[in-house]
Image (cartoon, rainbow, N blue to C red):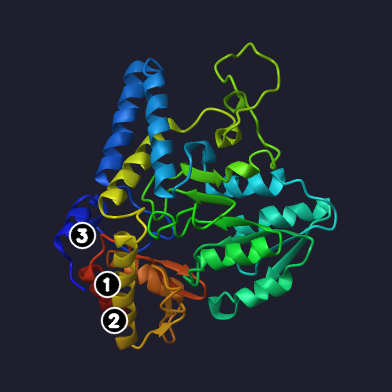
Amino acid sequence: MSESEPWARFRDQMPVTNHWSYLDHAAVAPLPKPSRDQLRDWCDDFAENGDANWLDWFRQLQSVRANIARMISASESEIAFIPNTTAGINIVADGYPWKSGDNVVTFAGEFPSNSLPWLQQQDRGVEVRRVESPDGRVDLNRISDACDDRTRLVAISWVGYASGWRIDVDAVCDLAHRRGALVMLDAIQGLGVFPLNVRNTPVDFLAADGHKWMLGPEGAGVFYARAEHLNLLRPIGVGWNSAKSPFDFGKETFELKETADRYEGGTLNSGGFLALGRSIDLLQQFGAGSDVSAVGERVIAIADYAVEKLLAADCHILSPRDAKHKSGIVTFAVVDENPETIRSQCRAAGVIVSSRGGGVRISPHAYNNEADIDRLVDVICT
């Protein structure tokens, strides 16, 4: 693996590299220059002009929506802006027409945002079936065994936040649909890096905040609902922006938009979404969103290099690294060392990592290079 010219150009767009070896994109990503500049420009405009240019922001937001739709081969009408992944999952969990005795199949060890919304449905008579995934490995046979004729949804993360296991989304959709269930995909640890075409991979619902692998700011995320399910979910948190005529404030009839943005409710975080749009533009310049993502391949190559170096430093790799299922997330343990201690030592040496899944978690992006990994390993070997 080498840092070829395109990736060096990508790195030049990331100011964080001037200060840190930043290996924590599965937590919160730093902003690229174009996104930072967009956010600054929006703040300046807002401070100097108030809402005088609000309609310009609104039009730009529709361009961002269109670009997000293209990234996953969806229709613009199937995309809603959301503040975070949690909000998107709750659109489905609270809006689904549950009946007592229905069940949802998910995994033990899911991030709380993809477990608590389902557990909350228990007071509506919904059973939550949590499938074990030993060592972070997802066994589709276990999912199949947990499903029956009362399974309404399979709710699963594209990439495990602690293990880094990347599921075969096509296989999950096929399994669930054969069982008559729908698929809710928590895509936050994959979207922006790995390709997804919802026309070929029939995910029913998807939610992802932009502040991880999409390199956007916090508070700006994406919700996808397949068009045929639009009227299945009871909209939660409806407001003026849910209405078919959103700018007719005097109209008091209950007529909602016939598009996914009915779920947006009220005023959006315009600055955040405009900055997210710039981040997605940048990722697409380097091959994100295509059927074979150059960004995803680069991320895995960097992670593989890290695994090689960590093994040479006598670390224990906790993340499964099966060829079809590996991702940019690698969790490892250092013998006789507390993960939090390692995390603190890394920070003091200018390396940003997390402590997750019983070990130290790294999550490099495509702009990271060998020097970033070597800096990490130097801390461990000191």
Residue at image position (34%, 46%) is: 280
Secondary structure of the residue carrying tag 3 is helix
- Most foreground residue, 275 or 149: 149
Amino acid at the residue labelled 2: Lys
- On screen, residue 129 above or below 257: below
Q: Label 3, label 1: how many angstroms apart (C-alpha)?
A: 15 Å
Q: Which of labels 2 and 3 is toward the front?
A: 3
x, y percentage for residue 204? Answer: 59, 52
Q: Are marks 2 and 3 in contact (CB under 8 Å)?
A: no
Which residue is rendered at x = 29% and y = 66% of the image?
298
Q: Residue furthest top?
A: 250
* Tags 2 and 1 touching, CB below 8 Å: yes
* Between 179 and 215, the one nearer to me in the picture: 179
At label 1, counting other C-alpha atoms closer than 10 Å, the crowd grade (few under 14, some 14-19, many 20 or more) is: many
The residue that mark 1 highlights is: 373
Locate the N terminus and report the quarter of the image it occupies: bottom left
Please name the amino acid that badge 1 sits on: Ile
**Image-based side of 104 in relation to 286, left or right:** right
List the residue tagged with mark 2: 309
Task: Indicate the position of residue 262 as horizontal and vertical percent values.
Answer: 60, 32
Q: Which residue is mark 3?
A: 7
Q: Is residue 82 visible?
A: no
Residue type at mark 3: give it.
Trp
The C terminus lies in which quarter of the figure? bottom left
Return the disc, 3 or 1, that comes first in the chain's sequence. 3
Viewer-closest of 135 and 24: 135
Q: Quadrant of residue 146?
A: bottom right
Q: Residue at x 69, y 15 (%)?
A: 252
| Residue 95 point in image, percent of width and height | 70, 43
Q: Earlier in the sequence, mark 2 or mark 3?
A: 3
- Looking at marks 2 and 1 on the same chain, the residue that comes earlier in the sequence is marked by 2
